[in-house]
């Protein structure tokens, strides 16, 4: 039997307190009583945004402003296959009301599980909502530039950056040296003191990965692995340049992808940038959050979101 294939626009409506809007499926629908992100089927001729705006008006009586493409994946249920396009919404008019007599709730990704049963395809997106939107990569580079990076690092912490990567490929003593390990340890302590997470690039020894909050795999290292190398409670990103790299990220069940370089960057002067159009096409295939890298900074966050990025990753920023 061929299963029906349904295209669905799903709303990740976020309020300024960082809560997300979930709704319970009404009595007369499949999966009645299960909690979900509000949304519904895309009708022919509609864009994803139009479908979402219509659904949120019909189901919850709100008129949304802009919506930003976030993650996109296909999920197979026993009786149907759904292609889910999740879109983030930050602004709307009107007061939320359950027009289909359904319950709804503003909740955090952690507390969502206390509401009741969640649709299976809503579970991973809730986890992804906890991944910060800005991802800063270290560049201590050399012992005499070290102080300058510590200053920049403090500024980033003060600006609220909560996710960092330790990546020092050119350190004079080597990528696994005692002198570099001391720097890594110090950065880890500082991150934790500020409630930030530190991942370590896979160029550094595997023993460091488990000490950190997770690992950022280079594409060439991801290809060598047959399964996810760290437990599910740690974060794992894969650095991708081509569509093929993204497929490896999917196989390894990465938590996110870093894709680029999107725009011209001094770190890859001789390679042409992907550009935003290609970025968005590749990002759609990732089935998980995607950070844009290459010419990015906190100021570019809005632009990146418009093209389907979860957030921005940067070294100089
Ligand atoms: N809205 C929503 N649907 C989801 C999520 N996860 C998930 O697998 N789905 C599936 C369930 C449904 O099979 C389909 C969405 O269809 P729906 O029942 O909401 O459709 P609809 O609002 O257009 O309602 P109707 O036309 O059937 O009355 O996508 C989710 O988080 N939100
Ligand atoms: Mg619906």
Image: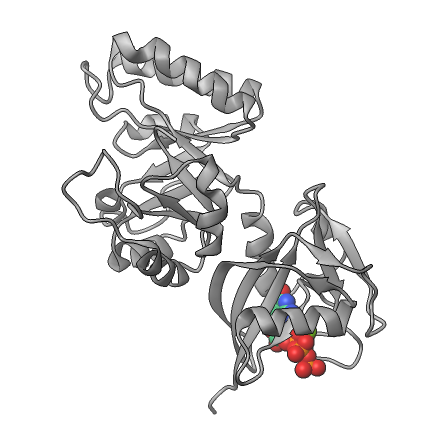
Residue 50 locus on image (x, y percent): 59, 72
**Does residue 310 appear in the picture of this structure?**
no
Q: Please give the name of the residue rendered at 19% of the width and 49% of the height, measured from the top-left corner.
A: 272
Q: Is residue 226 left or right of residue 14?
A: left
Q: Whole-percent x and y of residue 220?
A: 21, 45
What's the coloring here? one colour
Count of numbered badges drawn on the protein: 0
Please, is residue 5 above or below residue 260 in the view? Answer: below
As displayed, is residue 181 above or below residue 200?
above
Instruction: Judge whether residue 316 can be spotted in this image.
Output: yes
- Of residues 233 and 275, the one nearer the viewer is 275
Residue occupying the point 43% across, 56% down: 307
* Of 53 and 194, the residue lying toward us: 53
Q: Quadrant of the C terminus?
A: top left
* Quadrant of res 269: top left
Q: Residue at x 63, y 62 (%)?
A: 11
Task: Using residue 21 as the reference point, say whether residue 178 is left or right of it.
Answer: left
Up the image or down, 59 lies above or below 28; here it is above
Q: Quadrant of ligand 1?
A: bottom right
Q: Residue 78 falls in which quadrant of the image? A: bottom right
Image height check: is 226 above or below 136? Answer: below
In depth, the one of 248 and 84 nearer the eye is 84
In the rendered image, which quarter is residue 201 located in?
top left
- Where does residue 109 sit, x and y in percent of width and height? 66, 47
Residue 299 relative to residue 252: left or right: right
**Percent of width and height locating residue 242:** 25, 55
Which residue is the extreme one toward the left?
270
């Amino acid at each position: 039997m061929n299963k029906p294939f349904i295209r669905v626009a799903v709303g990740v409506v976020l309020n300024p307190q960082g809560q997300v809007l979930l709704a319970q499926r009404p009595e007369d629908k499949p999966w009645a009583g299960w909690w979900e992100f509000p949304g519904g089927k895309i009708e022919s001729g509609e864009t994803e945004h139009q479908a979402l705006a219509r659904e949120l008006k019909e189901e919850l009586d709100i008129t949304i402003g802009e919506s930003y493409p976030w993650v996109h994946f296909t999920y197979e249920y026993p009786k149907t296959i759904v292609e889910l396009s999740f879109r983030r919404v930050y602004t709307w008019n009107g007061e939320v009301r359950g027009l289909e007599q359904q319950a709804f709730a503003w909740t955090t990704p952690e507390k969502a599980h206390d509401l009741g049963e969640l649709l299976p395809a809503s579970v991973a997106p809730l986890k992804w909502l906890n991944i910060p939107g800005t991802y800063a990569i270290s560049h201590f580079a050399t012992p005499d530039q070290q102080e300058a990076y510590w200053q920049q690092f403090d500024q980033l912490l003060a600006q609220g950056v909560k996710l960092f990567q330790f990546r020092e490929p050119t350190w004079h003593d080597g990528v696994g040296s005692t002198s570099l390990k001391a720097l890594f340890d110090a950065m880890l302590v500082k991150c934790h003191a500020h409630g930030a997470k530190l991942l370590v690039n896979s160029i550094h020894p595997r023993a460091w990965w488990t000490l950190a909050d997770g690992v950022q795999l280079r594409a060439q290292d991801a290809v060598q692995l047959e399964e996810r190398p760290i437990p599910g409670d740690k974060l794992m990103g894969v650095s991708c340049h081509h569509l093929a790299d993204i497929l490896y990220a999917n196989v390894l069940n990465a938590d996110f992808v870093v894709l680029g370089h999107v725009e011209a960057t001094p770190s890859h002067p001789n390679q042409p940038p992907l550009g935003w159009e290609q970025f968005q096409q590749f990002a759609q295939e990732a089935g998980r959050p995607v950070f844009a890298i290459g010419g990015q900074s906190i100021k570019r966050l809005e632009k990146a979101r418009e093209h389907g990025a979860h957030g921005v990753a940067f070294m100089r920023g």
